[in-house]
């Protein structure tokens, strides 16, 4: 059975709530379609600033590079309160993707 390594970046603000539900969908899809997922959480955005002082820690970059995919929540929510200039994460809404063979739902 194929296993996919997925970095889970919950972000902050509403990000964790959305990503937690997306993880449930992902796990159900894996079960129905016959593949497995290994989920590895990492910090991003305001949550990362609060924990490490930077919006995109090197550890997060390493987790993403070691993964097959990244499940990305919203960064820069309420946790990054008051961050300005270089302390605030630079964010672009680019979402690269690769189309994969779809599974037949049973």
Image (cartoon, helix red, strand yellow):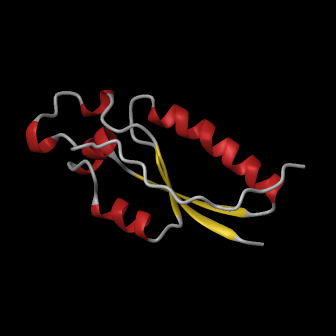
Most extreme residue toward the left, as rendered? 85
Q: Position of residue 68 (x, y in %)?
A: 53, 66
Q: Is residue 27 left or right of residue 61?
A: right
**Which residue is pictured at 70% across the width and 62% down the height?**
101
**Which residue is pictured at 31% across the width and 27% down the height?**
78
Does 11 appear above or below 41? above
Q: Position of residue 84 (x, y in %)?
A: 12, 34
Does 53 appear above or below 63? above
**Which residue is pictured at 36% across the width and 59% down the height?**
60
Q: Is residue 54 left or right of residue 100?
A: left
**Which residue is pictured at 40% across the width and 41% down the height?**
11
Q: Is residue 66 left or right of residue 48?
A: right
Image-quadrant location for residue 2: bottom right
Number of numbered tags placed on the structure image: 0
Q: Position of residue 64 (x, y in %)?
A: 42, 63
Image-quadrant location for residue 34: bottom right
Front in this rendered view, residue 81 or 73:
73
Front in this rendered view, residue 64 or 102:
102
Q: Position of residue 79 (x, y in %)?
A: 30, 32
Most extreme residue toward the right, as rendered? 106
The quarter of the image holding the N terminus is bottom right
Does 3 appear above or below 24? below
């Amino acid at each position: 059975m194929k296993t996919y390594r997925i970095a889970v970046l919950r972000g902050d603000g509403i990000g964790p709530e959305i990503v937690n539900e997306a993880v449930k969908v992902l796990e159900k899809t894996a079960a129905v379609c016959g593949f497995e997922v290994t989920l590895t959480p990492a910090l991003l955005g305001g949550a990362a600033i609060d924990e490490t002082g930077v919006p995109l820690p090197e550890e997060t970059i390493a987790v993403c590079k070691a993964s097959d995919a990244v499940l990305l929540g919203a960064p820069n929510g309420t946790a990054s309160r008051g961050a300005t200039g270089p302390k605030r994460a630079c964010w672009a809404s680019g979402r690269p993707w690769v189309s994969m063979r779809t599974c037949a739902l049973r």
